[in-house]
Amino acid sequence: MSGLIAIAQNEVRIGMRNKWIMLATAILLVFALLLVLLGSGPATSSSTDGLTIISASLATLSVYLVPLIALLLSFDAIAGEIDRGTLQLTLASPVSRAAVVMGKFLGHVIVLSIAVLIGYGLAGVCAFFAIDNVALAGVLDLARVIGTSIALGATFVGIGYVASACVRQTGTAAALAIAIWLFAVVLYDMALLGGLLADPEGIFATDLFPYLLVANPADAFRLFNLTALDAAGASTGFAAGGDVLPFAPQLAIASPFIWIVVALALTVVMMRRIKP
């Protein structure tokens, strides 16, 4: 247990000095503040809680930026150590490989949580003072978006480990991480949309589409949050979409957690095949 905590502390120190993470956190904060400024106008003239409307915008922002921050944190977790020759030293210590993976995961999730809390926390404080009609429900909506954003990021930290364990060079791992982000956040949705347009009344649209939607953790996160934010969902159409799903839309949040377990288990298996 002490070895796991030591590895987590080391990853936190490295992550806090990572310039790419600092830049991504700054971008997250800037975009969140812009959404607060743009959303505070219509929110003040609407009967809907202003913080709820801004939370819907932040949920959409999370789908694009949080997975990118997570992959930037995790892409060289294993490949980078192999490249630098430090993995042999880590594996030579009296710590199991599962503990190494879990220690890295804990450290990276802590760094990711700090980035999300800084970005969305400051934006939430600004929104609280900029909007008049803020209620407890809006605060809870923002807290739910922050919590599920951290869960979404943890999912892509685990996926980044799998990509990192597949290769031996840091550059290859970085390219693979960008490819994963592009596929999960952009290309996957385009493929689903293309399938719907090609077969709007067929088996794909009626039977396969809902399950393919939640199979992607980014889409599952968006579906869960936008259906939970009732007022925002009514304006975006996601609430109506959730009503026709063959399962309760609240179950969609299980997808990121399933991905976390599968990704970490797969990473441990792949780590055991690496010879020090």
Image (cartoon, rainbow, N blue to C red):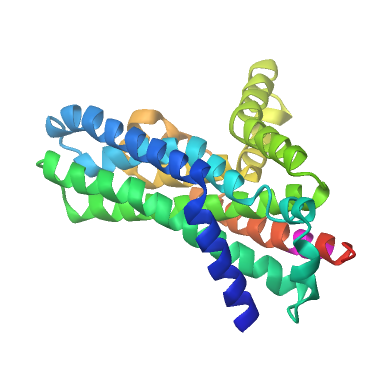
User: Does 146 appear in magenta?
Assistant: no
Q: Is residue 21 above or below residue 16?
A: above
Which corner quadrant holds the N terminus? bottom right
Position of residue 194 in the picture relative to residue 33 (left or right): right
Residue 206 visible to the viewer: yes
As drawn, which residue projects farthest toward the left?
Answer: 132
Comparing 161 with 22, the one in front is 22
Q: How many marks?
A: 0
Residue 1 visible to the viewer: no
Residue 30 occupies quadrant: top left
Q: Residue at x 49, y 38 (%)?
A: 65
Q: Is residue 203 above or below residue 86?
A: above
Q: Residue at x 87, y 66 (%)?
A: 276
Examine the residues drawn in magenta and state their main secondary structure: helix
User: Does 266 appear in magenta?
Assistant: yes
- Percent across and percent down for residue 213 are 61, 38
Comparing 138 with 68, the one in front is 68
Comparing 31 with 3, the one in front is 3
| Magenta segment boundaries in residue numbering | 265-269
Position of residue 265 in the picture relative to residue 220 (left or right): right
As drawn, which residue projects farthest toward the top?
Answer: 198
- Percent across and percent down for residue 264 are 70, 61
Q: Is residue 6 above or below residue 138?
A: below
- Percent across and percent down for residue 144 are 37, 54
- Percent across and percent down for residue 110 are 48, 62
Comparing 42 with 81, the one in front is 81
Q: Residue at x 20, y 39 (%)?
A: 50
Q: Residue at x 19, y 43 (%)?
A: 126
